Image (tube, rainbow, N blue to C red):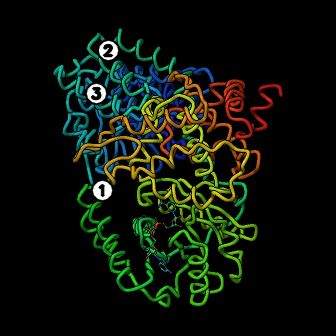
Amino acid sequence: MTTDSPVSVTREGDLAWVTIDNPPVNATSTAVRAGLARAVIKVQGARVAILTCAGRTFVAGGDMSEFDAPPVEPHLPDVVQMIEDSETPFVAVMQGNVLGGGFEIAMGCAWRIAAKDTRFGLPEVNVGLIPGAGGTQRAPRLIGMEAAIDMAASGAMLDAEAVQALGGLDLVTDGDLAMAARGFVADLPPRPVAVSQRDATPIAAEVLEAKRAAVAKRARGQASGLLNIDALQWAYLPFAEGQPKERALHLDLRQSAESRALRHAFFAEREVARPKAAEGAAPRDLQKIAVVGGGLMGAGIATASLGGGLKVVLVERDAQAASSAADRVAGLIDGAVARGKLSADKAVEQKARFIVTADYADAADVDLAVEAVFEDLEVKRAVFRQLAEVVASDTILGTNTSYIDPREIFEGIPNLSRCVGLHFFSPAHVMKLLEIVPLPETSTEVLATGFAFGKRLRKVSVLAGICDGFIGNRMLAEYRRAAEYMLADGALPQEVDAAAREIGFPMGPFELQDLTGLQIAWANRKRQAGSRDPAQRYVTISDQVCELDRLGQRSGKGWYDYVEGDRKPRPSAEVEAVITGYSKAQGIVRRSLAREEIMARILSVLANEGARIVEEGIAETDAAVDMVQIHGYAFPRWRGGPMQAADELGWDRVAAVMARLAEESPNSWTLSARASEAAGV
Ligand code: NAD
């Protein structure tokens, strides 16, 4: 028996049991690899070695905290090889998630058996890697090239029955796993050819091309998907040639900016879920919530809350609005069923937990009420006055406002310690981000409950301080301003959009405005006209575009032209005339901006504003800013967020770009302390 090792070996007659016990997910840490290597030696002489894991899951991946350092012996590919070469054959007995190194170990075994609800994956691509312990070489030999591509290049998870159908499992059981293992080893089939010595299944050239194209399309610039496909093709070489190639690429990628960024995103997600401001506080249990206002946002919030298992009362202003809101929520739930995201049974069960009403009294017994009515201070105040009259004095009250100061919204409401901003993103049942905005009075218990609520809805919640636009929309405003200045100075919308897509955004700022409509921002600009800093540069191109009735796709034209029935944006001569006319009227000599320059400007403006947000304490950390951008604004995850991207780019570069912007548009940009420091100012 190895003491202190997470891997133990026990003999039972001619059987050897090898058990990995490395909570929480039995990751392949150095100690686990060393323990397995010792175990292979110890089991020699037994008829068969049964490899199991303690707890809820088989090995569910590597220990990512070890990835920044050089790899330590014994290396996983060597351990898997020892298992495959062992005189005493191994049978992997699996439950839970068999991921990454876990699946690689299993493929080194002679046989594999699994509980029915086990899931298999090679998710290294999600952290910018390829498998490094034979995964790309054994998977095409065990389950076929097509399935291997889906797993390694797209991060697809397969369930046990699918893996069995592909020939990757010898037995799947929905009964007792240990019993099934005993039954299996009692009557072992002849030892099969080691997986590494089989032939990878062929794949038709067109199928391979189609898979490549699909992966490239989704990648938005991320390299690791296609690299996984490349590595999988080495499975057509002899294993002894393909495997070292895989290992070398894996080790290279560990040091790539892409993998660093994706690992940063992985850890940042966990970090933001535990803000310092809510430290030590226990959340309240939530059973039933109210959503007030069932428009675009309210319907989404209600749907997400039903998905999170809560009872939901949706309060609308009158019977007719209530009926439309009910239809909206039913439509979202039915849509999820139609897309195969939700079972029909679950939909029925969710609808049974949902009521819609025009009577605030129906919300009297809720634990939390979220307001999502019109973006109007007086309307919101009236809603909370009515709510406060019916709910308990400590019922949590949340506002989904995008811009209004929550302190003003809750003014006069008794017990401000229960009030908080809960800012969802559109569409709220899809977008992962939730900004949680405490008032000075908000209790840590209420804050912690906000985070628990977000978790229940499977959101990434980020603590945000009070300022115009909180974290995300404040950064968006700067991004848009930079984009408009570029139009005035020489770029065209299609050039800015192409640069944004090159960064990895699914859409550029102008295409996105066309999709969502230009009128709300136009109305906002009109409202803010009086309070704008007169020294700051204001470009009127957007206003002129709106005045031409070019309000976006829904009005048939916006920053781009559209032809009936086609959403493809086509550059518009009319818009170009507005832009060049504006430059001329302002006496600006237009100069063309290279794509790289536009990209650097977008990234620098976002990072500079993000740094200011952290410096002002609006966000606790850079990680928080990055999570807001990734989960609320589709910033490419593989760049890790604008703060991570700026770290890679260098803050001196950010400072240089900002200096250039300040030169072109005096009094219009505030340099963050971080960028000033980097510039040596
Ligand atoms: P919306 O106009 O689609 O919906 C507002 C709903 O509130 C309507 O159904 C209306 O009938 C209802 N309502 C109005 N007064 C009411 C009252 N007194 N009692 C009950 N219901 C009432 O607006 P929306 O886009 O869903 O936005 C709602 C809120 O969410 C706003 O504060 C907005 O700033 C915020 N928000 C919007 C977005 C977005 O992208 N649209 C994103 C984040 C936050």
What residue do we see at 79% from left, 37% from top?
Answer: 673
The Cα–Cα distance between marks 1 and 3, rounded to whole angstroms, is 25 Å
User: Can you say which quadrant of the picture contains the N terminus?
Assistant: top right
Q: Where does the image place residue 308, in percent across and percent down from the top left?
A: 44, 65
Q: How many callouts does the rendering have?
A: 3
Please name whichever residue, 68 or 275, is drawn nearer the observer in this view of the structure: 275
SS class, disc 2: helix
The amino acid pointed to by label 1 is: Lys
Please name whichever residue, 147 or 205, is drawn nearer the observer in this view of the structure: 205
Which residue, given by chain and number where applicable, does mark 3 sit on?
Answer: 213
Q: Give yes or no for contact between labels 1 and 3 (Cβ–Cβ under 8 Å).
A: no
Please name whichever residue, 407 or 289, is drawn nearer the observer in this view of the structure: 407
Residue 17 seen: no
**In the visual, does 521 lie left or right of 560?**
right
Where 196 falls versus 12 (above or below)? above
- Earlier sequence position, callout 1 versus callout 3: 3
The amino acid pointed to by label 3 is: Ala
Q: Where does the image place residue 426, in percent across and percent down from the top left?
A: 45, 57
Q: Quadrant of residue 383?
A: bottom right
Q: Where does the image place residue 664, in percent across and percent down from the top left?
A: 67, 30
Whether disc 2's CB lies below 8 Å from ligand 1 is answered no
Numbered badge on residue 234: 2
Numbered badge on residue 341: 1
Farthest residue toward the right?
681
Of the two numbered discs 1 and 3 in the rendering, the one whose residue sits closer to the viewer: 3
Residue 625 seen: yes
The amino acid pointed to by label 2 is: Trp
